[in-house]
Amino acid sequence: MNPLAMLMPTHRASVSAFVLGLAALATIDALRLAFGTAPIPGFIPLFVIWWVCFSLFANRRRHAGRDTGLALLPILLAILAKGVGAIVGIGLRSFEAMMTFAEEQGVDTADQMALNEAMMDPGFQPAFQAWLEADEARLLEMLSAGAWPSFIGFWVVAGVFGLWFATLQRNGSANA
């Protein structure tokens, strides 16, 4: 496998190089989530992963003799799926935290009417937000609940496009 096929979108990626590159990238992304990237702050690791993923898709299309413009579509849709996954994960954890807060306030969460009444109280949401902000560990735990669902969303979409791009056959068209 040509390592430049992973880093620069100006090379060719055979089917095996493409599939191995995506598998290696997904593994690195999982390790990033599991262990963090302490020396490298913020979104830099994500941008690197997205760039390498784009390079692989572009190089696979180039190897198949196709235009590389469509290589951006899998990345954009995978990033969108990553955002949706994060929202779902955080939303579910937020709902769990809201139920815990309601129970601590003496609301019987098994009684749907009592729960609805408590949530309709104008002071419920500001009190819930203050409760979350009072415990930074609880807030960070809630926000980190979106990490793995976003990972799954990104790699499911990238994998589906990966299957499609891996089946591309060479045609006689000019390289892009």
Image (cartoon, rainbow, N blue to C red):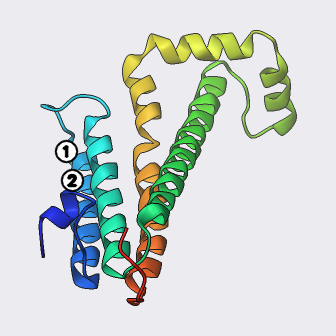
Q: Nearer the viewer, residue 130 or 169?
A: 169
Residue 105: % across, % down: 65, 18
- Disc 1 designates what residue? 35
Q: Nearer the viewer, residue 55 or 131?
A: 55
Q: Is residue 36 above or below residue 31?
A: above
* Labelled disc at residue 90: none
- Indicate the amino acid at tag 1: Phe
- Disc 2 designates what residue? 31
Residue 24: % across, % down: 21, 66
Q: Residue visible at 48% across and 49% down?
A: 79
What is the CA distance from the residue labelled 1 to the residue labelled 2? Answer: 6 Å
Quadrant position of residue 53: bottom left
Q: Is residue 69 above or below residue 34?
A: below
Quadrant holding the C terminus: bottom left
| Relative horizontal placement of residue 30, taking residue 147 as reference (left or right) | left
Do labels 1 and 2 touch, CB within 8 Å? yes
* Crowding at mark 2 (Cα within 10 Å: few <14, some 14-19, many 20+): few
